[in-house]
Image (spheres, grey):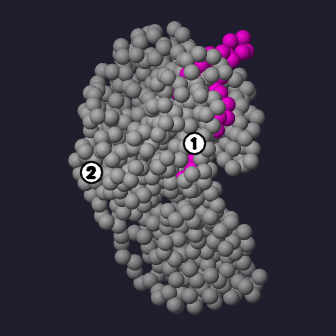
Amino acid sequence: MKQVAIALAALGVLASVAPVKAAAPNPRKIVAMLDGTQNFGSTRRSLNFYDVTSITGDGASNPSNVFNQTPLFSVWGGYEDSIGSNFEDPDTFAVNPFNGNVYLMAFDSGPAGVVDSAGDTQGDLDLYEIDYQLILNDFETNSRTPGTMYAPAVGPDGAINPQHPDHFGTTINLADASTKIGEVGRTQGTSFFDRDLLFFDPQTLAYVDNEQDGSDTAAQDHELRIISRISKSNGAAVVDASDSDSILGGYNAQTTESWGTDRVGVLNMDFVGGVATGFSEPEDIVGVDRNGVRGVWVAETDGGGDDFSFYPLVGGAGSGVPATATTIDSLGNSRSLDDDPEFDTATNDGDHDFTIADENGNLIIGDSGFFDTVPGGEAGSGGPAGEPAFIRLNVDSYGATNVTLVSGDAWDDLDEVDGFGPVGSDRAGDDLDPPTQLEGPLGSLTNTFGGGTGLSSDDDSNVTDGRFATYDPDSKVLFLFDIDSGGQPDVVGDVIGINTETGEIVYEESNAANHFFIEHGIRMFRRGDSDGDGDVDADDIDALVAAAVSNGGTSLSEEEFDLTSDDLVTLGAAAGTDHATLVRDILGTEFGDVNLDGIIDITDYSTVSGNFGMTGAGWADGEITGDGIIDITDVSLVSGNFGFDNSALPSVAVPEPASVLLVLMGCAGLLRRRR
């Protein structure tokens, strides 16, 4: 320890000249919003990306017009044919949260398996991949104007995609911006159904399909399906049409890859006398990947206290084991909203609006209460019974055969939004801990953002629409997009941001988002966040390193960590590696910033020197290069970048790297002799 003390003392001169100002890394947060307008609008049939990095859980410092501006950029899928009149018809999407790449699913009508005149297979689901990183790089490198529309250079049939017909700005036709990667089979049910898509990894997606026919029997119920990539080349998909009502596998027309779908089970959420009966009514699905367990929560809306069931997934996705799913019965087959305290005295029924899994695997649930008719009347009549409430189902752990809820505190009240209810007109029966029933503008909902109380952005007399929401695990803010009025092309909506830990409104905009919302068309992500906790930190750097070390970074599962769109995961400080992209481009810092505070100084060196010689180390320990050992190479990176400061302020009296290296190498030598 004496040598360590001498080494650190020798670095006092460096500490005295190190920069003192820096900006902590703050990677960009994005809300992606699918505009479902079919016939009108500047961004119809497009995916819009909004930068919401400036919105935090502290309302006092938040801006006021993020969604009222044009999006950062938009992506349009173009036309399906060379005629230039048939838009691709996306209805849901999923995001790889680590790199931002989007998987977009579009419904194809027509007879299953029949190729139309444009060369597209009918009666299936077209799967597209949007290369967010490629587009972002073009946007930043070429200093594009916010609101720029991107489209593939050519459509699936090889025809050149022209400008978006209604977009007000410029359309950039960028090769590989959006690529049709697969055509997957689907059920041939005749009723309309809003599908929802989940991302697990770059070769595994999941969704709930339609019922198989109109028989309303349990055997023909909605199907839980996994979509798997079979090959990165075209032509390997095989369709299984042995059941004409439920086609599995996939097709290969105009695709760059080969994808197929497998049925893992039917939902069967409705029971009579312990026997599954009739169709379920799935409204929302949420993917969970925790404790080594992958599974899907399904929320059902049926007018009698909506239900939630969890289905763990086993096999599939190249495991060699057929994919299966079963309902976990530890929740009594399913948990109902009529079991929770958010009820009116009339029926004790809840009505599901949305379900989101937070960073801990708990469920944030929107409960509209539309079936509770007393005291305020039905939805739209002006009573709080029709206003949405937000509650959380707290999960202790996930297992392959059971879900364990938090004992004694499974349900947790978050908030109720009532834009016009009288003081004290909250829902009856609130016995939660904390026992807060919050509403506004005349109620007790604290509006931190506005500096007062109550909700000011809900500027109409309609019930707040709670169906369209997304969640930021970093700021703990739940974003609610309330459609007020108007039809195509003038759909307007308010945006409300609620801190789920404090119950405070921290963000609001009136008449902000002019999009035709789709229920499963809003997602939030932060590029570089591998574990879904909302921030990008040393754990995420270590996850990328582990992916790169495993099998050379070329296996399918490691594509999840590909930040440069080359299907590889590469290490090193050289420009263009995934390692450097995460550290420099996303985190906005440099190799050697061990504590990720935006500055490389004596604190970082102290960590490296104190752990010199450690094996199995990570970034926070001072292992910078990714080889698992803290050695002279890591010391050299600290010395070479010593004095780095990512703030806009100029650095002062920064030593020359060569002189720093001499001092640090000497200290490292002392440490080696000690060890």
Front in this rendered view, residue 440 or 346: 346
Local packing at callout 1 (Cα closer than 10 Å; few below 14, some 14-19, many 20+) is many
Front in this rendered view, residue 602 or 618: 618
Secondary structure at numbered mark 1 = strand
* Residue 602 appears in view: no
Q: Is residue 635 left or right of residue 463?
A: right
Front in this rendered view, residue 120 or 529: 120
Q: Where residue 250 is drawn, which disc sits there?
A: 1
Residue corresponding to mark 2: 163
Quadrant of the snapshot with the N terminus: bottom right
Kind of residue indicated by mark 2: Gln
Q: Position of residue 390 (x, y in %)?
A: 50, 29
Residue 493, quarter of the rendered image: top left
Residue 170, quarter of the rendered image: bottom left
Secondary structure at numbered mark 2 = loop
Residue 40, quarter of the rendered image: top left
Could you tell me which residue is drawn at 60 percent across and 54 percent down?
A: 231
Q: Residue furthest left?
A: 168
Q: Position of residue 443 (x, y in %)?
A: 39, 24
Kind of residue indicated by mark 1: Gly
Magenta stretch bounds: 257-283
Q: Is residue 652 above or below residue 89?
A: below
Could you tell me which residue is drawn at 38 percent across and 53 percent down?
A: 158
Q: Is residue 242 above or below residue 203?
A: above
Front in this rendered view, residue 188 or 229: 188
Q: Is residue 377 above or below residue 60?
A: above
Q: Where residue 169 is drawn, which disc sits there?
A: none
